[in-house]
Amino acid sequence: MALHAARFRHLLLNESNHRACATLRANSAVDYVADEAQPVTLTDPWPLVEGGIEQVDFTPFVGEVDLVAGGVPCQPFSLGGAHRGHLDERNLWPEFNRCVRQTRPLAIIAENVRGLLRPSFEPYFDYIRRELAAPFEQRVDGESWQDHDRRLLKALKSDGDPTERYDVAFKLVNAADYGVPQNRWRVVLVGFRKDLNVEWNFPKQTHSSGALVRSQISGAYQSRHPSAALEEHPGVTPPEDGLKPWLTLRDAIHDLPEPELRKETPGYIHHVGWPGAREYPGHRPNDLDRPAKTVKAGVHGVPGGESVLRRDDGSLRYLTVREVARIMTFPDDWRLEGPRGEQMRQLGNAVPVELGRIMGTSIANALASR
């Protein structure tokens, strides 16, 4: 959705999760058929292959791809996961590289959790970046990643074929800094094929916490949301930084009606109240006047209160699926398939659409100006 909004025409999607595939089909995707004509306009459906990426052959698209984009599974590196890193069978960085080798794209973008930057993963993260920089220096059967990394280090000291090398950069970004109503830290990696000689920098942040505090002290925030209490921030008012205020949970959902328990709200999809919200140690609810907490791939089983909000009167309730979709900046007509838990899981596994659109548009502009 994000890259479509950045005006990239999708030639192929791959997803292994059945419910996520059903959601894609419910919106803009159709099953890929090898001998059918490729999409030619942004209004054409997105061709989808359901199943493991290991079984997908990308060679039919060689020379036709501007961008390879991947949300590599985060569990091997997540702070909430088993931390098995490269030993985890869900580590699909090698498959991402295979896709790059088989398609030879002009650019690449990948996203993962901030846990990838943990000191214990630093050697492997260095290896990931070197492998992206030289994806055609392929790892051979039986070769350890450490031995492959030593080969990559040696290869990258030489010029090599610029059509088989990529200039790779990474940045830890917070989605809230780009107009997403959610504190969500993620590592984004971007690369351009070396022969293009593209000079590119990550988009500058557009929003800040300091600007939000200033707007709440001045009353500008309350002029938009009269029901919000005037904030009292002890200490020095943050200095002017020329940025917009962080968007808050109230900004995201203020125009949605209060949901009824177990009933769909007329005029909306997935806006259904759910009973049982409560607060306990380690489970602090979302504050309406701050960005939402990081949406995670779980519902009641995830600690931290990510799916609970505190109303103005102090009472608690669960966020609806539609409200979480708003927090992830999906449009209101985006339909999610499966029961509530699966819908929440899909949202927690997604990239905020607005963050992805900003990154994708910056890449598209760089490619167009080369």
Image: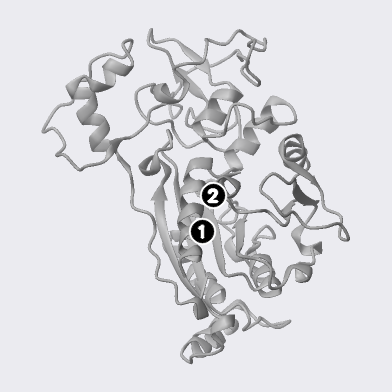
Q: Position of residue 207 (x, y in %)?
A: 32, 40
Q: Position of residue 223 (x, y in %)?
A: 27, 16
On screen, residue 146 versus residue 236, left or right, reads right
Between 150 and 199, the one nearer to me in the picture = 199
Between 144 and 63, the one nearer to me in the picture = 63
Badge 1 marks a residue whose secondary structure is helix
Separation of marks 2 and 1 at Cα, in angstroms: 7 Å
Q: Quadrant of the N terminus?
A: top right
Badge 2 marks a residue whose secondary structure is loop
- Please, what is the three-letter code of the amino acid marked with disc 2? Ala
Q: Which residue is mark 2?
A: 6
- How crowded pointer 1 is (Cα within 10 Å; few <14, some 14-19, many 20+) is rated as some
| Residue under the point 51% across and 48% down | 356
Q: Position of residue 80 (x, y in %)?
A: 53, 45
| Residue under the point 22% across and 42% down | 242
Q: Look at the picture and state if 61 lies above or below 211.
A: below
- Please, what is the three-letter code of the amino acid marked with disc 1? Ala
Q: Which mark is residue 107?
A: none
* Residue 232 visible in rendering: no
Mark 2–mark 1 contact, CB under 8 Å? yes
On screen, residue 264 versus residue 218, left or right, reads right
| Residue under the point 42% across and 13% down | 311
Q: Who comes first in sequence, dot 2 or dot 1?
A: 2
Which image quarter: residue 181?
top left
Which image quarter: residue 324?
top right
Q: Position of residue 106 (x, y in %)?
A: 57, 70
Q: Look at the picture and state if 97 lies above or below 25.
A: below
Q: Which residue is mark 1?
A: 364
* Residue 54 visible in rendering: yes
On screen, residue 165 versus residue 343, left or right, reads left
Q: How are the colours assigned in the image?
A: one colour
Q: Look at the picture and state if 70 lies above or below 299.
A: below
